[in-house]
């Protein structure tokens, strides 16, 4: 059966979102065609302000690239406007005289800048601020013109003004009212904003009504009602927008301010819908994306025949996207007789907050200078929470909490991304369900952060917070931890560049938020410093318990002791010692570990040092982010299949690399033949003996992310195995994120890339040298604890105090 | 009746900084922490996590300790578990006189 034909007029933010939602539910439902007047795929119009302000480029703001349309088999005609809709024959006609018939039609034509109808508006040098073309016009003018005048002191006008200022023009904003952004701000906040913008170099002409635009062909200035004039080479009209409804009204579809729709975005004509800024719903034509995206959801469900709640209108908050200005407003602005206001005005720090309350409910808020509470206040507003039990201070700041707004204490239903209506709960769920680790991945799955972008820092905090529980996940997030916004690479680069030598210095110089860091960054920095400086003095207080104690803590607070058995080879003597200790100390559990050795479990902390002393065996580091074991098979010495001496090589490798700090634990295996009894295929480095040589596999993992190792090289001699392993290990150490296993690391960097590095003779030699230098710094930790009273006292004793009353 | 006693437990100058020590006073297991600022805090040496564990081995940052097993962040000042986790650890009053550290139990 042929699919129904869906045609959409307008290739902008709301419309394309609706298509995305449709495809999400039922990708095969419609045969889709989109007409867009602009020559671009759908882009993030909101970010035009940032493009103008020089912070991003046009390419960066594309939301759906050409490929997306192709992948979803959407026919797209760009640079082509629909000029006629024939509702009787169900055909649209474009300005290229292309005719396309439809079964369903969506109007998503957006709106246009309102051009003030004064004398002279037909002159050159006047533009709106709506699309990429307008942006390009302004950028071009700024190259060889001086004076820009923006008419309109609302959101759009101020963002345009700031952009033009950044482009080097002299900018004046003309505003009809006595204060800026009067629809979003009260007089106090507006005044603060004005002063800030004045400081940023923008001039204001308040309470001025433009009556004429001066100039011959090209603008030269404006005249105001009071008779005064000002010069201008470029005029930007930003006094408002008007829905693009003519096409619909010409087709006899009922329009008012916009194209009239019901709660399901249906016009009065069957099969024809309208969405976005061109639509008027219950008397309102919205001009921010948040409500439009809600509409998109309802429309999509309706069109694929899924049951949906009706769209009943929205309240949304606004903010200004100008660098250095933090501002938020939602709901009512000015109170009336029945509202009570909580006002905080800190003139010293330039912070102003006003929360309007009526009948014990928040009905509006204006925040200037600091907007951390915005999401919480917005929740109170939209959910009509009863605040009668709260103090005014706690309305502005959650109880028991310090200045920072903590994502941890944020309820799940709190809106994080206002534009896309995404709550914290949804984000957390997506992070868990789809193993997301970056802000852009969260955006890809939930749309959060894909519009105005203001919530991105918060999304990153949520990521951090959510991944914090799972160690492996934490490795891949962008910032090292919540104490900093710097990524691993940035931190490492700064350490090297500034020559920082210890953790405290790193935190001080790089502006850590918590003076002494947290349980994420302290061990990580300790690792990175140790990776950078071969002679680094380890900071034991920054190791987590197991590594600090050189023993694995068990859930009851006791420890395990697992000594080395190089290559899984032991002796009668060692076994005797183990047995003696187990008997003497009443060790509750003696077990063979997965790494071919013997573990004693359930040991009291204060017995650790004596047990180590009696065992007189080196630590097996079964607790560390370091080489754990080298598992071996019996090999050539005894096995009739073995072609190589696997035990010998395994022991040699374990002795060479033991104690080395690595980003995460590191396991090796050596098998003497391809039967692979040592399971070399699931080791970080796994070696398999073959006739006349060895195969070296890397990045295998037998744990949470089961992964078969990749064959790195086949080499002839044992010496080559050691060389390749050394270089590989060191490259992992130098480029891995702390807590990143080789399986993830190899996938991130790519095996080919790693091979290229190892094949570069000079680079490879450097790696091996740095590794060998680092290996010189280690001492046997158990021995150290036995011999050094200070260490013994500090870490391994339990103080007894007598109960004496003073 | 419950008697309050002040117990001398350690020498202030001998306390390691940012590394907890475990003290046993009769039946009370106590974790004592000297933080970077020099202040000393005493908490019950038991993680508030339902599965238990000790606190004395935790990583210390400022006036917080991280539970070594479950990574909960706990205030040394009032024993409060920090969000998103919840709970409360018993704290003890600590005083320092003439280099001697006392705990009131
Ligand atoms: C500079 C700027 C900053 C903004 N900042 C924010 C912000 O911070 N937060 C926020 O929520 N919102 C912001 N907005 C508003 C937001 O961009 C709009 O609400 C949103 O883009 C509306 O989506 P839409 O699909 O309805 O219209 P549009 O995105 O305008 O898409 C409509 C498209 O249809 C095309 N079209 C019109 N007629 C036809 C025709 N006959 N044939 C073919 N194509 C046609 C148009 O060319 C246009 O490309 C901002 C807007 C601008 C301009």
Image (cartoon, grey):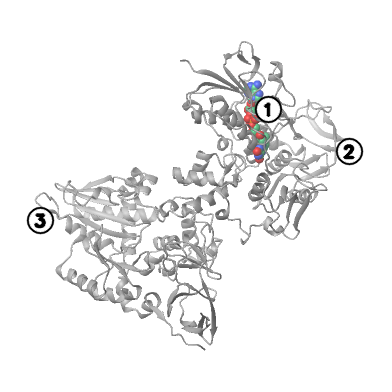
Are marks 1 and 2 in one subunit?
Answer: yes
Are marks 3 and 2 in one subunit?
Answer: yes
- Direction from residue B30 to residue A321 in the image, left or right: right
Is the CB–ligand 1 distance for label 1 below 8 Å?
yes
Q: Mark 3, mark 2: which one is toward the viewer?
A: 3
The image position of residue A606, as x and y in percent, is 34, 76
Q: Quadrant of ligand 1?
A: top right
Please name the residue that numbered disc 2 is placed on: A228
Q: Nearer the viewer, residue A73 or A116?
A: A73
- Direction from residue A639 to residue A663 in the image, left or right: right
Query: Can residue A777 be seen in this snapshot?
Result: no
Alpha carbon of mark 1 to alpha carbon of mark 2: how far? 39 Å
Q: Mark 3, mark 1: which one is toward the viewer?
A: 1
Q: Is residue A534 above or below residue B94?
A: above
Numbered mark located on residue A279 in the image: 1
Q: Is residue A132 above or below residue A486?
A: above
The image position of residue A608, as x and y in percent, is 31, 73
Please name the residue that numbered disc 3 is placed on: A638
């Amino acid at each position: 059966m042929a699919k129904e034909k869906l045609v959409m007029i307008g290739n902008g933010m709301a419309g394309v979102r609706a298509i995305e939602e449709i495809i999400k539910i039922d990708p095969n439902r419609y045969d889709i065609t989109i007409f867009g007047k602009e020559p671009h795929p759908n882009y993030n119009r909101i970010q035009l302000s940032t493009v103008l302000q020089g912070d991003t480029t046009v390419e960066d703001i594309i939301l759906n690239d050409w490929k997306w349309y192709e992948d979803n088999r959407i026919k797209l005609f760009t640079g082509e406007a629909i000029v006629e809709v024939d509702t009787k024959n169900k055909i649209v006609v474009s300005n290229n005289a292309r005719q396309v018939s439809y079964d369903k039609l969506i109007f998503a034509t957006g709106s246009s800048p309102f051009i003030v109808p004064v004398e002279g508006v037909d002159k050159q040098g006047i533009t709106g601020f709506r699309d990429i073309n307008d942006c390009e016009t302004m950028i071009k003018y700024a190259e060889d013109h001086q004076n820009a005048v923006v008419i309109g002191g609302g959101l759009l006008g101020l963002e345009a003004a700031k952009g033009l200022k950044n482009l080097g023009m002299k900018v004046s904003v003309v505003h009809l009212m006595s204060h800026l952004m009067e629809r979003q701000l009260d007089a106090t906040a507006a005044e603060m904003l004005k002063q800030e913008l004045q400081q940023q170099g923008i001039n204001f002409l308040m309470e001025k009504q433009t009556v004429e635009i001066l100039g011959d062909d090209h603008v030269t200035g404006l005249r105001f009602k009071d008779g005064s004039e000002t010069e201008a080479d470029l005029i930007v009209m930003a006094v408002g927008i008007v829905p693009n409804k003519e096409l619909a009204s010409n087709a006899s579809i009922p329009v008012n301010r916009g194209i009239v729709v019901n709660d399901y975005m249906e016009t009065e004509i069957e099969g024809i819908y309208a969405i976005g800024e061109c639509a008027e719903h219950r008397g309102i034509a919205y001009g921010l994306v948040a409500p439009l995206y809600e509409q998109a959801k309802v429309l999509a469900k309706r069109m694929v025949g899924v049951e949906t709640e009706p769209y009943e209108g929205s309240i949304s908050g606004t903010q200004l996207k100008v660098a250095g200005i933090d501002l938020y407003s939602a709901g009512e602005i000015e109170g009336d007789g029945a509202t009570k206001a909580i006002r905080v005005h800190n003139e010293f720090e330039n912070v102003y907050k006003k929360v309007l309350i009526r009948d014990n409910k928040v009905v509006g808020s204006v925040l200037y200078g600091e907007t951390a509470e915005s999401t919480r206040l917005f929740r109170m507003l939209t959910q009509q929470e009863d605040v009668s039990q709260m103090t005014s201070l706690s309305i502005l700041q959650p109880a028991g909490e310090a200045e920072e707004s903590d994502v941890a204490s944020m309820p799940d239903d709190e809106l994080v991304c206002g534009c896309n209506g995404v709550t914290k709960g949804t984000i957390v769920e997506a992070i868990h369900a789809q193993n997301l680790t970056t802000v852009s991945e969260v955006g890809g799955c939930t749309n959060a952060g894909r519009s105005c972008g203001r919530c991105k820092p918060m999304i990153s905090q949520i990521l951090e917070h959510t991944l914090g529980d799972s160690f492996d996940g934490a490795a891949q997030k962008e910032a090292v931890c919540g104490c900093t916004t710097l990524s691993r690479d940035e931190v490492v680069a700064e350490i090297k560049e500034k020559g920082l030598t210890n953790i405290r210095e790193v935190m001080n110089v790089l502006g850590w938020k918590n003076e002494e860091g947290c349980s994420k960054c302290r061990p990580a920095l300790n690792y990175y410093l140790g990776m950078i400086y071969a002679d680094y003095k380890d900071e034991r207080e920054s190791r987590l318990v197991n590594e600090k104690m050189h023993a694995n803590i068990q859930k009851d607070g006791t420890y395990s002791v697992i000594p080395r058995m190089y290559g899984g080879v032991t002796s009668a003597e060692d076994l005797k010692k183990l047995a003696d200790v187990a008997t003497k100390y009443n060790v509750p559990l003696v077990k063979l570990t997965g790494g071919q050795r013997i573990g004693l479990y359930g040991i009291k902390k204060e017995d650790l040092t004596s047990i180590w002393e009696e065992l007189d065996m080196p630590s097996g580091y079964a607790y560390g982010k370091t080489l754990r074991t080298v598992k071996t098979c019996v090999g050539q010495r005894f096995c009739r299949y073995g072609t190589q001496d696997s035990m010998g090589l395994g022991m040699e490798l374990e002795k060479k690399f033991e104690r080395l700090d690595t980003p995460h634990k590191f396991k090796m295996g050596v098998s003497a033949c391809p039967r692979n009894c040592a399971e070399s295929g699931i080791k970080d480095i796994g070696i398999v003996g073959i006739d006349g040589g060895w195969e070296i596999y890397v990045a295998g993992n037998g744990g949470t992310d089961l992964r078969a190792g990749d064959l790195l090289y086949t080499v002839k001699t044992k010496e080559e195995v050691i060389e390749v392993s050394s270089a590989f290990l060191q490259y992992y150490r130098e480029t891995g994120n702390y807590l990143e296993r080789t399986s993830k690391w190899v996938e991130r960097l790519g095996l080919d890339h790693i091979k290229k590095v190892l094949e570069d003779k000079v680079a490879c030699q450097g790696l091996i040298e740095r590794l060998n230098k680092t290996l010189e710094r280690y001492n046997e930790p158990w021995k150290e604890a036995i011999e050094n009273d200070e260490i013994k006292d500090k870490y391994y004793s339990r103080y007894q105090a007598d109960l004496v009353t003073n | 009746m419950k008697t309050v006693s002040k117990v001398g437990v350690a020498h202030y100058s001998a306390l390691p900084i940012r590394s907890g020590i475990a003290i046993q006073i009769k039946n009370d297991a106590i974790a004592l922490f000297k933080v970077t600022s020099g202040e000393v805090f005493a908490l019950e040496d038991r993680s508030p996590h339902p599965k238990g564990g000790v606190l004395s081995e935790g990583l210390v940052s400022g006036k917080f300790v991280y539970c070594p097993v479950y990574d909960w962040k706990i205030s040394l000042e009032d024993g409060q578990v920090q969000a998103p986790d919840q709970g409360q650890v018993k704290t003890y009053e600590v005083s320092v006189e003439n280099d001697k550290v006392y705990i009131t139990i």
